[in-house]
Image (cartoon, rainbow, N blue to C red):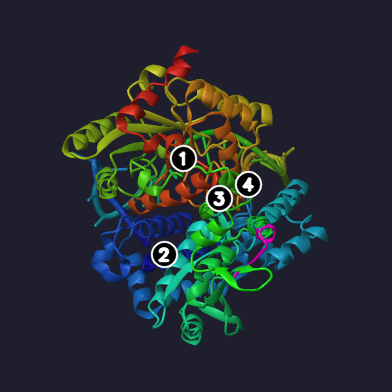
Amino acid sequence: MARRNDEVEALLAEYADLVQITGGDAFKARAYEKAARAIGGYHADVAELDVDGLRQIPNVGRSIAEKVAEYLRTGTIFMVEEARARVPAGVRELTAIPTLGPKKAMTLYRDLHISSVDQLVDAIKQGRLRDLRGFGEKTEERLLHGVELLRQAGDRILLSTATDLAEEIVGELSGVRGCVRCGYAGSLRRMRETVGDLDVLVAAERSAPFMEAFTRMPGVAEVIAGGEKKTSVRTTRGVQVDLRVLPPHSWGAGLQYFTGSKAHNIRLREMAVRHQLKLSEYGLFDAESGDVVVSETEEEVYARLGLPWIPPTLREDRGEVAAGLRGELPELVRTTDIRGDLHTHTDLSDGLAPLEEMVAAAAERGYAYYAVTDHAPNLYMQRMTDEKILAQRERVRELDRRHRGMRLLHGTELNIDAEGGVDWPGEFLEGFDLCVASVHSYFDLDRAAQTRRLVRACENPHVHVIGHPTGRRIGRRPGIDADLDAVFEACARTGTALEINAHPDRLDLPDEEIMRARRHGVKFAVDSDAHAALHLPYLRYGVGTAQRGWLTKDDVINTWSLRRLRGFLRKEGARAA
DNA sequence: GCCGTTTTCGGCCCGACTGTTTTCAGTCG
């Protein structure tokens, strides 16, 4: 069930942008940004709160609480509407282009009346930006490159957005009378990092009630096509959703067919042909007689082709069919295998929730251990000091004594500098149970320099995990240019784990690099990088990515017992070197 | 607009990088 918090967060963030674009008070804009983030990460549903309750949320004062209440009551906020009237929606969309912020967006609109990405591209090509103050040749290049990036991510949405939407739709349709089965398929079921459109399947005798319920769902902006077997809609956020209703006996074949990938299915159909069979979304048929052989479950379809059931996350034609035929499919790591999270934040740095709240939420998830890893001082904006982190350690130790079932580890997220150095000297790092080290700056160093800094970080005997190793942000920034094989080799040699950061806009390492790293013998940590208690469940997306990289439980250090994990954290490899 | 061991005003994450300037604005993390 979607929470109203997300709508409120989006609206306040929009208002913050509009304040900036119109040249309003920068501190006011930041106040709205902070309130938006706090509401997005708040544990309670804002729809359940009155003004006083809303004011309990950090960074929400009287004014914002009243605006939120206004929104919950009327569906709009007058001040936001007023601001929207002054700035066309396209101007705000321009700020989605990397390196183009609110100031430049406003200049483009004010001086050249540019209010869409397309208009911007045209204007650049016509050389109309040349005369603008603050815009030069390099700026034009960077903007075009930024547009390119934006378009690559294009109409695809993040895995988390797609999951939330799909679960809502499945929940709705499951409640319709006559529903035998309901679920989603497509690249979402394969847990690809982004999803183009959603495929929802229903097994039922009669399709009409489902088509009707589907097109009437809130959030449906337009019905693109409506038939007996298939209906397609576009949501108000621009996502296309296809609903297919199948006869119950075709469920397995339909699920298999619509899950894909295309390449995986082609391989399966070729196998079917060799068995004198024909595979379609309705079943596996005898090629000659046309009689149905199997169709009810995916397992039967795979079995009849001589294969074990192949997990959806492997269905990318990356060798899974051959491995299945040999009986060598990996036993993939599952979310339930994860015994702890090794990269999380609190409000001591840029997290939203206090230590106690994060720890309570982690305990709720049944973890055996949990690491708190706030930012170290070199990420200057966090203002970390030795005193603050040591005081936190005392609180962590105290809480650890009180939490019977779950061991707390005190760690930090270090910042890898341009040369591969980190924030604190060895003797200070010695005091941490665990150190994650990540790249947060110097994304444009050349390949040799990037490789060198990452290898050096691995060689630091106090660095246990390389956080979000490529630094990419999906749809916003490509990963750094480094010789990853050299980095993987260094990880394996020194006993440094690579993180699979589960945050939906990172998913870093990406799946293909995970496969490569595994061949070097690297171990991995699947972490949420949570900045609020609500982010802890992001872990599922990291596990999905790990599965797409063919990882087993043994490859992932945070599925291990605490004793085995502590052995890994001694990092004998790097110390011996 | 929010917040307070600096409490009703006056701060607010701070430094670096980039490209465009010719001393700095804009963007980012």
On screen, A163 above or below B22? below
Q: Which residue is drawn at 53% across and 64% down?
A: A185
Tag shown at residue A314: 3
Q: What stretch is highlighted in magenta?
A: A272-281
Residue depicted at 42% across the width and 76% down the height: A180
Q: Is residue A164 magenta?
A: no
Counting other residues with Cα less than 10 Å from the Cα at mark 4, is it few (<14), some (14-19), or many (20 or more)? Answer: some
The reply to the same-chain question for discs 1 and 2 is: yes
Q: Determine whether, in the image, residue A132 is placed left or right of residue A564.
A: right
The residue under label 2 is: A6
Is residue A239 something one can see in this rendering? no
* Residue located beneath label 4 in the image: A318
- Among the two numbered marks 1 and 2 on one chain, the one whose residue lies closer to the N terminus: 2
- Queried whether the magenta region covers residue A280, the answer comes back as yes
What element does badge 4 sit on?
loop
Specify the amino acid type for callout 3: Leu
Whether residue A110 can be seen here: yes
Q: Do the residues labelled 3 and 2 touch (CB within 8 Å)?
A: no
Q: Crowding near pointer 3: few (<14 within 10 Å), some, many (20+)?
A: many
Q: Could you tell me how far apart the alpha carbons at marks 2 and 4 are, in whole angstroms?
A: 37 Å
Q: Mark 4 lies on which chain?
A: A
Dot 2 or dot 4, earlier in sequence: 2
Q: Have a look at marks 3 and 1 and say if they share a chain.
A: yes
Element type at marker 1? loop
The residue indicated by pointer 1 is A552
Chain of the residue under the numbered disc 1 shown in the image: A
Distance between the alpha carbons at the discs numbered 4 and 1 = 16 Å
Residue mark closest to the camera, 3 vs 2: 3
Q: Which residue ends up furthest to the top in the rendered image?
A: A576
Q: How far apart are marks 3 and 1 (CA)?
A: 12 Å
Q: Which of A329 and A476 is in front in this view?
A: A329
**x, y (%) of residue A195?**
57, 60
